[in-house]
Image: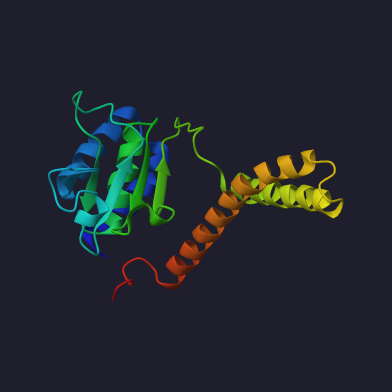
Amino acid sequence: MSRNGRLFRRLRRLLPEWTPDNAEKVAIYTSEVIPARTLPLYDPDSTPSTWNERMANGEYAVHFSGFEDVPEGTPPFCLVFRSVEDAEAYATAEVARRPGLRCRVYDHDGLAGAPLRELRGRDFRDSSDISPHFRRWGGWVLFGGGLLLFCADWIVDFRWLWPSMVGSRMILPGAVLVVTDVFIWIYERHRRTYPVGERGA
């Protein structure tokens, strides 16, 4: 096991026992022993300009939910590490140091699917995410309900009109949620079939 792998496992064991002072020290230590490079999320002066297209195969990026500790005016960025263990070790230390933070780890495929890892501080709250449960059931309810309403009006030669109008407005957002959920399921299945570190081998 690598030194950074041992560090990561120790961080996970100590996480429930950390105090703010210990978390600060561990975060500083982690940043010193695990090298990373800073990558702007978008750089119009670079070709290619997006962050994941400037990563090499086998690199892993840590994305942050906020940038409170950086100078004002600093463009959004991610930190890129040479292994997923390094990225997770750093993210683990950061969410312990900043309990309101969320860190997500992505590979060079970018935001094409769900993050490889997600670590949340104990105080992190995010109301912007659509939960998988809502995406799945909400999508099917909207799509199925809209289709039933539309078909009911179609059977009576659209005499009622309102079912087809309401149904047509339910079908599109429902289809978007269902298709999104299917793509995420396919991506997760592919990731389980080809674990991190084995893809592209």
Observer able to see residue 133: no
In the image, residue 27 sits, relative to residue 150, either above or below, namely above
Residue closest to the eye, 147 or 70: 147
Left or right: 69, with 35 as reference point: right
Residue at image point 62% right, 44% down: 134
Q: Is 110 drawn above or below residue 186 in the view shown?
A: above
| Image quarter of residue 196 | bottom left
What is the quadrant of the C terminus in the image?
bottom left
Q: In this view, does 2 lie above or below 31?
A: below
Does the rendering let one see residue 146? yes
Residue placed most toward the observer, 182 or 171: 171
Residue 84 figure quarter: bottom left
- Give the percent coordinates (x, y) of residue 83: 25, 59
Q: Which residue lies furthest to the right in this view?
A: 156
Task: Tell me what residue is drawn at x 72 percent, y 41 percent.
Answer: 165
Residue 89 percent coordinates (x, y): 30, 49
For the point 22% across and 50% down, the residue is: 80
Position of 23 with respect to 186 (left or right) is left
Query: From the viewer's perspective, is 14 left or right of 48?
Result: right
Image location (x, y in percent) of residue 98: 34, 31
Coloration mode: rainbow
| Image quadrant occupied by the N terminus | bottom left
Residue at screen point 79% across, 41% down:
161
Tell which of 31 and 193 is nearer to you. 193
Q: Position of residue 139 (x, y in %)?
A: 64, 49
- When the figure is inspected, residue 153 is found, relative to residue 77, above or below; the finding is below
Q: Nearer the viewer, residue 187 or 161?
A: 161
Which residue occupies the extreme top position in the image? 72
